[in-house]
Amino acid sequence: MKRAMWAAFVCVGLSGVVALTGVAQADVVPASVVQAFRPARQADLKVRTTTDTTTVTTNVTTAVTTNVTTTVTKDQVNRWMTELSNWGRWGKTDQIGTLNLITADKRRQALTLVRDGLSVSLAHTIDKEKAADNPRPLGQEMTLDAGGHAMDLYSIWYHGSIITHIDALCHYSFEGKIFNGFERSAIAPGPGCPSNGIENHKNGIMTRGIIVDLPRMRNVAYLEPGTPVYPSDLEAWEKYAGIKIGSGDALFLRTGRWARRTEKGPWNVAANSAGFHASVMPWLKQRDVALLGNDAVNDVQPSGVEGSPRPIHQLAIVALGLPLIDVMDLEAAAETAARLKRWEFLLTAAAVPVLGGTGFPLNPIATF
């Protein structure tokens, strides 16, 4: 069944609103999104396979394909908004999305990963100086009173590319809706997000964390800005590290952004950075990843999807209900993991529960 639909891409809390064009939706999964699947599940999928001269539709029972393109279009992204949707999966009132995948059993299993008791922060220490990747630095107003107390007032624009933060599920919208079908129009100055606000993460996150360190696998210091990461890269890392990404995991991609910054100086990461290509989203849905992050803005920039500047954000937050952690600093944790030869760890994180917040700065902790 096909129907016409109009897409709207909105960053709640950001100043820009970008309108997308009308597209048609169909129950067809392009082969480009299936290329990295393996038969962890068998499903009868319709796959659009592109050859040199023709496009054909076939039925498959295993999600293994070869010689398929990694090109993703805006139309495909819009179709995935329905095909990959988790709306209603945990009930009509759910407001935590894929964090539901972090079950009590998953938490207990994650606790067994602590062997050395060594904890490492996954957050970047906040810079206060204006730079190409920090156009709106943190403001700190100090107060020193006669009683000998020192206090400060912070002004923080954290939805950027310099402060480690988590995005709440009201941060992005599509066709006037946020995750699980709540109305974007209900969001307003003052009360903020009446649904899907960051206060819903109040109980914190405790699960297995996994670092994907592609620069190390490729024997380079960092990935160059604009380098896309595909499902095949994630599977290559699994073989390299001897690990399997699964349900309830937190998956963190190290691109080496901070190593490059140290070597070459700041640059506009929001416009030009290595990151996930849109084609990873069906793979992440199939693996039931609970939390996604990297050391830049998660989306490869430019996205490579004409008319869709941040498809990872749109699909993850709105369709899957998959919270994102942007601007992580994975350098120390990656070095620790390499030394210990263990790329999995206990992840703990908790945002301050601001009522109706679109996210909050975060200090995730990896404990090995």
Image (cartoon, helix red, strand yellow):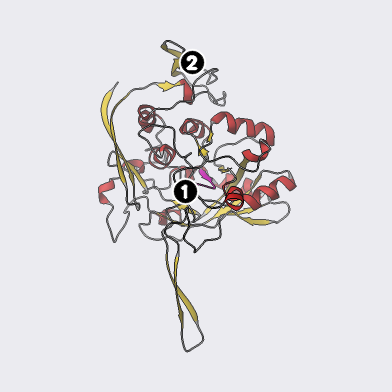
* Viewer-proximal residue among 77 and 289: 77
Image position of 132 with respect to 91: above or below:
below
Which numbered disc, 1 or 2, marks the residue that appears first in the sequence?
2
Residue at image location 49% in from the left, 64% down from the top: 128
Residue 200 occupies quadrant: bottom left
Mark 1 touches mark 2? (CB < 8 Å): no
Q: Is residue 113 visible?
A: no
* Residue range corresponding to the magenta coloring: 291-296
Image position of 40 with respect to 201: above or below:
above
Residue 268 has which mark? Answer: 1
**Left or right of 89 on screen, residue 64:** right
Packing grade of label 2 (10 A; few <14, some 14-19, many >=20) is some
Q: In which quarter of the image is the N terminus?
A: top left
Q: Where is residue 8 in the image (x, y as percent from the top left)?
A: 29, 39
Separation of residues labelled 1 and 2 (CA atoms) = 43 Å
Packing grade of label 1 (10 A; few <14, some 14-19, many >=20) is some
Image position of 119 with respect to 32: above or below:
below
Residue 60 has which mark? Answer: 2
Residue at image location 58% in from the left, 44% down from the top: 106
Q: Can residue 205 be seen in this view?
A: yes
Q: Position of residue 326 (x, y in %)?
A: 49, 49
Viewer-nearest of discs 1 and 2: 1
Q: Position of residue 81 (x, y in %)?
A: 37, 33
Residue at the bottom extreme?
Answer: 146
Image position of 206 with respect to 299: above or below:
below
Q: Is residue 295 magenta?
A: yes
